[in-house]
Amino acid sequence: MRDVIGWPAAETASLLDTSVAAANSALQRARTTMQEHLPARRTEWSAGKPSDAERVLLDRFIDAHERNDAAAAVAIASQDLRISMPPDMMVFDGLDVIAPFLERAFAAETRDGDWRLVPTWANRMPTAASYLRRPGDSEFRAFKFDVLRIEDGAIAEITTFGAGLFSAFGLPPSL
């Protein structure tokens, strides 16, 4: 919670029902373990606040998804875009694989419903909290988080997480 959401040690310790010292120790061990398993490129990720360019790209990502516009979504992605969905082992690499998937997902006859996305930040990276209104439903319900890694002015990677953390981000379960 500390690295992903930016919570203070005391709040993280309270959530985990442990001491601040134990939470800090666990964080240090987790960081070491993650460094051993992450690809080398991830060490280059920004540790600062999101830039204006990242915010604009997040806005464009949200707009493309709310309009179900696959072409607009592809236009802001790098050619070697990667999408992963932990803890599932699903990984999609490259626009040649991902673009047809987006076209089917956004097509009126095959899409799951209507989307509303809320901008937020996770691990200091632009993130879209997605709400889905399925056909026949009157509410948009929490569905997923898309954490975006931006590289050279394009979305280079999207890591998708389930809706379980919406409350931790202070987001409602439905709109």
Image (tube, rainbow, N blue to C red):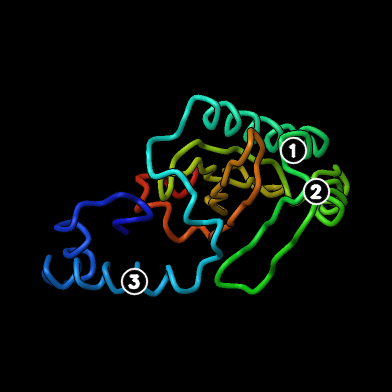
Q: Nearer the viewer, mark 2 or mark 3?
A: 3
Q: Disc 1 to disc 2, how far (Cα)?
A: 8 Å
Residue 87 vs residue 41, the one in the foreground: 41
Vertical arrangement, residue 13 with respect to residue 122, above or below: below
Marks 2,3: beta carbons within 8 A: no
Residue 73: mark in rendering: 1
Q: Residue at x 61, y 73 (%)?
A: 88
Q: Disc 2 to disc 3, how far (Cα)?
A: 34 Å
SS for tag 3?
helix
Q: Quadrant of residue 73?
A: top right
Crowding around mark 2 (Cα neighbors within 10 Å: few <14, some 14 to 19, many 20+) is some
Q: Residue at x 66, y 37 (%)?
A: 154
Residue 102: mark in rendering: 2
Crowding around mark 1 (Cα neighbors within 10 Å: few <14, some 14 to 19, many 20+) is many
SS for tag 1?
helix
Residue 31 vs residue 143, the one in the foreground: 31
Residue, disc 3: 30
Residue 54 vs residue 164, the one in the foreground: 54
Place of residue 40 in the rendered image (x, y in percent of width and height, measured from the top left): 54, 62
**In the image: residue 112, left or right of residue 116:** right
Q: Disc 1 to disc 3, how far (Cα)?
A: 34 Å
